């Protein structure tokens, strides 16, 4: 599958899937300033906000060479007798675990790595990566790779036709390629989209047909080159007069008290204490910041991405986890560090989005308003004027739009959920396809605040696209509601010119619902077959 990468190094397998004044002011399009001085405190094992990752002693001991230990030429590999001895010890320890970790690793050639992990090469082309404490990290065979968390739950499955990723709380994203360069992405149990390339008026676009909570809509993305790859940048539905961008950019004369009407929403109750909207707004940029964060969290909740992450919120996580595991006890297991295996990181508590963080995001909203104003004047250059190149500045904040499994710079596996905030640590060199980012705020069980993680630029582009889409929707709402519900009245010069629709490909009709239903069935089958692939036909 295009974009997929499976790496095995030193016994560790990782997988990267292949998402009031200033009415006449014209903001200048400059990169976001590097004055974002907020730095998360350095994590320490004793800190209540950052979980220490348990490192267990191996549950096995290697026989001495005289009794069948290491083979001579390759001292990481054990002899047949040594392999049998180590596997007997490991399987004895696994008998006290649960789920897939209770199943015996089949006999095979054992290699011992300096970090204590084991690679077992078994019959039928199967390769097992086992943590020092006996838990299964991954298994691969015939182009299929499954990666497991320390408690035995699936983290991801890769097949020749499909990528499946599950977050710490069990939510699922499925990606599969379609004929003609199309791609199908399902998120949770109900949402997803189908994307495919289109040519329109001499330009190349990517069009996505979305299905979200029973509603369908289409978005277009313009293509451009960045860091050696073709990337897709969100195209807004409309552009506005420079005076409107200026009204949203500059501080308002008086703070606006605004009631969002979220109090009775399940998603809001789920995120209470992590995200709390402001009581009054000094500018349109501050208002748009809460709109952006609120919509991102609400969309994730609707997709089932946070099901089970708050008491009574959203019900059980949908989708199969394998025949051996369920998500019913995921919350109880998620902070079981003794079983985590030493290569996973979890936050034991929320690190909320503070007013300081929101103000930093508001400053970036202002910069985006400047980019969009410039792009409205030069539509052919829009992707480069308001795309990823403009925000790849050290200290820039990204808000996660869809849940991801990521690795830290130290090789620890952890999850990011929608609404987590991460900060670009440094601008990646030209040609690099990944970037290092530091977690600023996150939910319980996600990557802890202060951890530095590695993300593909494709994921940052998806976060930027979500930012652009929510800002686009927020600008429309702000214009429609100006002078109402506590918002100030915009100057006539800002609202008299009507929004100008952006020329983009016409929406095409696609039966996305049936495609997503079929894909989810195939994903269920792929997940349920993991155990059979790994443990059947033992010799």
Image (cartoon, rainbow, N blue to C red):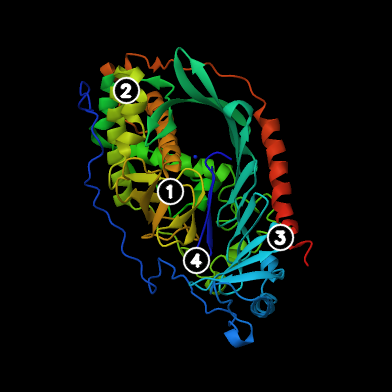
Would you name the residue on which mark 3 appears? 534
- The residue beneath circle 1 is 455
Residue 433, quarter of the rendered image = top left
Disc 2: which residue = 375
Across the whole image, how many numbered discs are drawn on residues?
4
- Please report contact status of discs 2 and 3: CB closer than 8 Å, yes or no: no
**Mark 1 touches mark 4? (CB < 8 Å):** no
Do the residues under discs 4 and 2 have CB atoms within 8 angstroms? no
Q: Label 2's element?
A: helix
* Residue appearing at x 57%, y 28% in the figure: 181
In this rendering, does residue 472 appear at all?
yes
Q: Position of residue 494 (x, y in %)?
A: 29, 19
Q: Which mark is residue 343?
A: 4
Q: Secondary structure at mark 3?
A: helix
Label 1, label 2: how far apart the Cα atoms are: 27 Å
Which residue is nearer to you in this view: 419 or 176?
176
* Direction from residue 240 to residue 67 in the image, left or right: right
């Amino acid at each position: 599958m295009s974009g997929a990468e499976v790496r095995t190094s030193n016994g560790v397998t990782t997988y990267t899937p292949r998402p009031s004044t200033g009415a006449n002011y014209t903001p200048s399009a400059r990169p976001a300033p590097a004055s974002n001085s907020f730095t998360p405190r350095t994590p320490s094992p004793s800190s209540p906000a950052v979980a220490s990752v348990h490192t267990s002693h191996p549950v096995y001991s290697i026989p001495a060479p005289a009794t069948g230990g290491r083979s001579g030429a390759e001292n990481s590999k054990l002899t047949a007798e040594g392999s049998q001895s180590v596997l007997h010890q490991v399987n004895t320890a696994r008998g006290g675990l649960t789920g897939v970790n209770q199943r015996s690793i089949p006999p095979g050639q054992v290699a011992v790595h300096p970090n204590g992990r084991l690679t077992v090469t078994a019959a039928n082309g199967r390769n097992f990566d086992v943590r020092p404490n006996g838990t299964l990290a991954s298994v691969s065979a015939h182009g299929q790779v499954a990666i497991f968390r320390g408690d035995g739950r699936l983290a991801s499955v890769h097949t020749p036709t499909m990528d499946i990723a599950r977050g710490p709380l069990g939510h699922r994203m499925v990606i599969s390629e379609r004929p003609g360069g199309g791609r199908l992405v399902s998120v949770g149990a109900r949402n997803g989209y189908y994307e495919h390339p289109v040519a329109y008026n001499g330009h190349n676009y990517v069009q996505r047909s979305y299905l979200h909570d029973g509603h369908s809509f289409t978005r277009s993305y313009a293509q451009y080159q960045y860091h050696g790859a073709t990337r897709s940048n969100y195209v807004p539905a409309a552009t506005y007069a420079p005076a409107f961008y200026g009204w949203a950019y500059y501080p308002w004369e008086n703070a606006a008290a605004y009631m969002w009407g979220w109090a009775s929403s399940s998603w809001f109750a789920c995120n209470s204490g992590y995200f709390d909207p402001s009581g009054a707004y000094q500018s349109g940029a501050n208002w748009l910041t809460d709109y952006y964060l609120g919509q991102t969290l609400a969309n994730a909740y609707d997709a089932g991405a946070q099901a089970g992450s708050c008491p009574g919120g959203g019900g059980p996580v949908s989708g199969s986890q394998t025949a051996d595991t369920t998500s019913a006890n995921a919350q109880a297991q998620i902070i079981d560090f003794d079983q985590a295996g030493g290569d996973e990181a979890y936050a034991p508590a929320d690190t909320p989005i503070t007013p300081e963080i929101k103000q930093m995001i508001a400053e970036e909203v202002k910069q985006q308003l400047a980019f969009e104003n410039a792009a409205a004047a030069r539509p052919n250059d829009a992707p480069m004027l308001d795309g990823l190149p403009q925000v790849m500045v050290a200290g820039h904040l990204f808000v996660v739009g869809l849940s991801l499994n990521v690795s830290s710079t130290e090789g620890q596996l952890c999850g990011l959920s929608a609404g987590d905030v991460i900060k670009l640590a440094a601008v990646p060199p030209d040609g690099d396809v990944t970037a290092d980012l530091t977690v600023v705020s996150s939910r319980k069980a996600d990557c802890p605040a202060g951890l530095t993680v590695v993300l593909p630029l494709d994921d940052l582009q998806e976060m930027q696209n979500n930012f652009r889409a929510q800002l686009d929707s927020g600008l429309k709402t702000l214009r429609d509601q100006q002078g109402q519900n506590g918002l100030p009245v915009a100057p006539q010069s800002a609202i008299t010119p009507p929004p100008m629709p952006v020329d983009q490909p016409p929406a095409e009709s696609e039966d996305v619902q049936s495609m997503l239903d079929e894909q989810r069935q195939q994903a269920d089958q792929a997940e349920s077959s993991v155990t059979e692939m790994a443990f059947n036909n033992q010799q």
